[in-house]
């Protein structure tokens, strides 16, 4: 309740153009949003860029926020930014290069000693289809309810649950297998 | 999907999400966050300036509209017959003389011209020299008065 009131006050401050309030929002959501972008792109530089873009968009669009779940609104913007990124021709090319680099680094990483931590999850995530991967990340980082996610994706809640269930089961099999 | 099956799905999803918690994604760099905050501050400034500018433009437009309305209103309220008859109002002519004065001067000049012609022809028995001098002086005086207004 207090957290919700605080968030409401911060949003009011943001609407007034208070930079301090925007800084608070950055502190509150940067970690989750960065994780979301990182798990979808697998690249730190692109995640940095997308996170910056997200908060700039937030400044531009804060006046259009009409209440309701702020996380839902914020992650809707994040999802749109990620989709725009995928659509961009130059960026797609860059992504292909990044993927190529990632695959090469995976090979070298496997050759490295066991002491070095390998982000096993990130590697296995690539084996899932793009839509399922996005759904899993959206649910995990936005912490939205199944209902909210289903509404955001404009699909029945049963479809969302089934996709999530199937995707996470597969992921567990990949990681543990 | 029956409720029992849905519950089973949710439990499986929670187990899957536990896996995600065990493998956290990297955190954003502190430098990146500082840059984002600076970028936000830069975005806010022009937006604020734009808002103030918009307010100023609106205020100027409203002021201009009020001035126009007041000007039109007063000109409608003022009767054309009253123009110039209001006490305290002095209407100055654009010209340094009135049309009435001009007519008087013209008449007198014509008269002097005619007198000079008469003298030149010698029709009148008068002391010509002194009369001509007198008329010339009068002509100079009139010309001087005319240009003074």
Image (spheres, coloured by chain):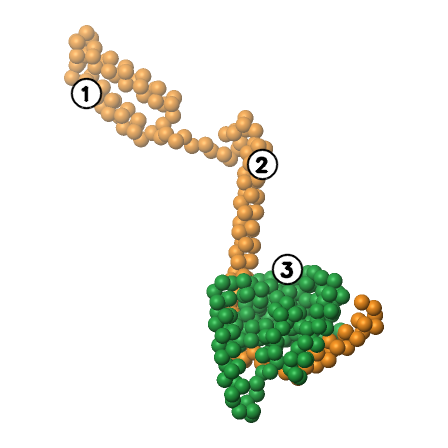
Chain colours: A green, B orange
Residue that lies at the very extreme toward the front in this rendered image: A177
* Circle 1 crowding by C-alpha within 10 Å: few under 14, some 14–19, many from 20: few
Residue B73, disc? 2
Q: Quadrant of residue A67?
A: bottom right
| Mark earlier in primary sequence (2, 1) | 2
Alpha carbon distance from label 3 to label 1:
96 Å
Q: Secondary structure at mark 2?
A: helix
- Pinpoint residue A31: horizontal percent, then vertical percent: 61, 77
The subunit letter for the residue under badge 2 reads B
Instruction: State whether residue B45 appears in this view.
Output: no
Q: Is residue B144 left or right of residue A11?
A: left
Alpha carbon distance from label 2 to label 1:
61 Å
- Pinpoint residue B110: horizontal percent, then vertical percent: 28, 16
Q: Nearer the viewer, residue A110 or A66?
A: A110
- Pinpoint residue B137: horizontal percent, then vertical percent: 22, 23
Q: Nearer the viewer, residue A106 or B118?
A: A106
Q: Which residue is mark 3?
A: A64
Residue A115, disc? none
User: Quadrant where the N terminus of chain A lies?
Assistant: bottom right
Identify the residue shown where x is 61% and y is 80%: A121
Q: Which residue is mark 1?
A: B133
Residue that lies at the very extreme toward the top in this rendered image: B123
Identify the residue shown where x is 17% and y is 12%: B120
The image shows residue B64, relative to residue A91, as above or below, that is above
Identify the residue shown where x is 58% and y is 64%: A83
User: Quadrant where the C terminus of chain A lies?
Assistant: bottom right
């Amino acid at each position: 309740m207090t957290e919700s009131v605080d968030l409401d006050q911060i949003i009011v401050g943001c609407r007034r153009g208070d930079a301090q309030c925007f800084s608070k929002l950055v502190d509150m959501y940067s970690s989750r949003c960065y994780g979301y972008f990182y798990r979808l792109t697998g690249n730190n530089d692109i995640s940095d860029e997308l996170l910056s873009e997200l908060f700039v968009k937030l400044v531009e669009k804060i006046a259009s926020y009409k209440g309701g779940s702020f996380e839902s609104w914020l992650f809707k913007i994040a999802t749109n930014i990620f989709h725009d990124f995928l659509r961009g021709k130059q960026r797609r090319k860059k992504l292909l290069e990044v993927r190529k680099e990632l695959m090469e680094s995976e090979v070298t990483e496997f050759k490295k000693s066991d002491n070095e931590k390998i982000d096993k999850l990130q590697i296995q995530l690539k084996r899932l289809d793009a839509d399922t991967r996005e759904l899993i990340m959206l649910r995990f980082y936005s912490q939205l309810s199944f209902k909210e996610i289903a509404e955001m994706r404009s699909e029945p809640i049963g479809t969302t649950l089934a996709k999530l269930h199937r995707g996470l089961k597969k992921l567990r099999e990949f990681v543990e297998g | 999907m029956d409720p029992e099956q849905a519950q089973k799905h949710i439990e499986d999803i929670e187990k899957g999400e536990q896996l995600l918690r065990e493998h956290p994604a990297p955190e954003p760099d502190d430098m990146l966050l500082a840059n984002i905050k600076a970028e936000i501050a830069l975005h806010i400034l022009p937006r604020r300036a734009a808002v103030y500018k918009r307010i100023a433009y609106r205020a100027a437009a409203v002021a201009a509209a009020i001035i126009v309305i007041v000007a039109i209103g007063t000109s409608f309220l003022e009767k054309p017959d009253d123009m110039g008859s209001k006490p305290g109002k002095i209407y100055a002519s654009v010209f340094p003389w009135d049309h009435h004065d001009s007519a008087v001067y013209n008449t007198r000049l014509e008269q002097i011209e005619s007198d000079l012609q008469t003298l030149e022809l010698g029709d009148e028995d008068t002391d010509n020299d002194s009369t001509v001098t007198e008329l010339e002086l009068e002509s100079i005086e009139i010309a001087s008065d005319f240009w003074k207004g």
